[in-house]
Image (spheres, rainbow, N blue to C red):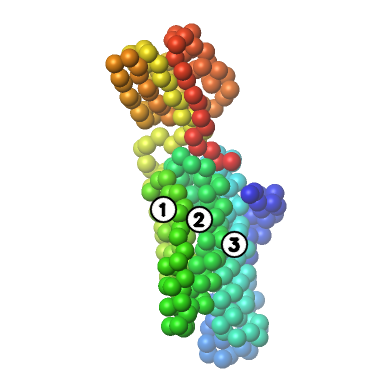
Amino acid sequence: MKDSPWFNSTKSRIAGCLLAAVSTAAATVIDSAVEHAELSRLTRELPVAAGIGLALGVLYYLAMRYVLPRLERQQGDELWAGLTWFNLGTLSLWLPLFPLPSTYVNFGIGFVFSGGCARLVGAVYTVFGASLSNRKRFANTFVMLALTIMLVISVVKASLALSLGLVGALSIIRFRTAIKEPEELAFLFFTVAIGLGFGAGRFGITLTAFWAISVGFIMFRRIQSAKHMENAYLVTVYGPEKDLLSSMSRFLDERKLPYEFTRLETTDDSSHVSFLVEIDSAGALEALNRHFRQEYPGTNMTMIQARSLV
């Protein structure tokens, strides 16, 4: 699933940043007026809040425009798309102005922010995650998961009977999702926590924790010394030769291809070696295949794309 090209346009990015800043500034005035039952204040203070919000929105956009282009274009576009979804979600902060029961207003704000936060979490995981699986496809489930959890908590939080019924229902369902790496499980829990927080009506603490965890994870990935390969292939070589490991390492070093050793298995009459290799061109793939066919005619080699952002 891909976002509409509109979400990666300059107009959408500017509009999202301005709306986020204006909505946040206006929400402070709206909440204060509603709390003190002084709706007449809105006509005086909302224009001032909107002006301050526009100024902050411009600064917000310029800051993001300075930070995100430091990434590769595909990574920057993905983060901008997730950020735009979140920014547009701040429009829900205007709901208190409508003549709706507070229950529906809180549900609407929580529902929209759950989806926006989950979409941005998916973008962060896609760009900065290190899992070998297709991170983009896995991240596509975050929005639905967060919204479902938020809906469930909103329905059962005020009823003991419904809570007990939920426990009984979940005892019947068996979840058998294959979690390949701990990082996937961590992001699933992060998404569930977002849905729980907004479903329970804890908007402030949930948003604060959301930004703290997201920014902290990004900073950790940026300063981490480990190699971060975006177009990796799992290269497996097995055959009767004994020096496959040294030969393969020497070839990769000569070609200056980033790699990580993953497996070595030897027996009396064969060897089995696996590497995770960063290969960004078809020519490098063909050269690797040709080298081992010429060097070791009896060797079998398989190359599988191990990680991708698409």
Quick check: can you spot residue 183? yes
Dot 3 lies on which element?
helix
Residue beneath the point at 60% across and 86% down: 101
User: Dot 3 corresponds to which residue?
Assistant: 87
Q: Position of residue 126 (x, y in %)?
A: 51, 47
Q: Nearer the viewer, mark 3 or mark 2?
A: 2
Whether label 1 touches label 3, CB < 8 Å: no
User: Disc 3 or 2, which lies upstream in sequence?
Assistant: 3
Comparing 56 with 272, the one in front is 272
The vertical placement of 246 against 102, above or below, is above
Question: Which dot marks residue 185?
Answer: 1
Q: Residue at x 55, y 66 (%)?
A: 147
Left or right position of 200 against 27: left
| 114 relative to 162, above or below | above
Q: Amino acid at mark 3?
A: Asn
**CA gap, disc 1 to disc 3?**
26 Å
Q: Inspect the image, locate mark 1, and give the three-letter code of the amino acid beneath it.
A: Leu
Tell me the element at label 1.
helix
Q: Quadrant of residue 241?
A: top left
State the mark number for residue 107.
none
Q: Amino acid at mark 2?
A: Val
Q: Residue furthest left?
A: 268
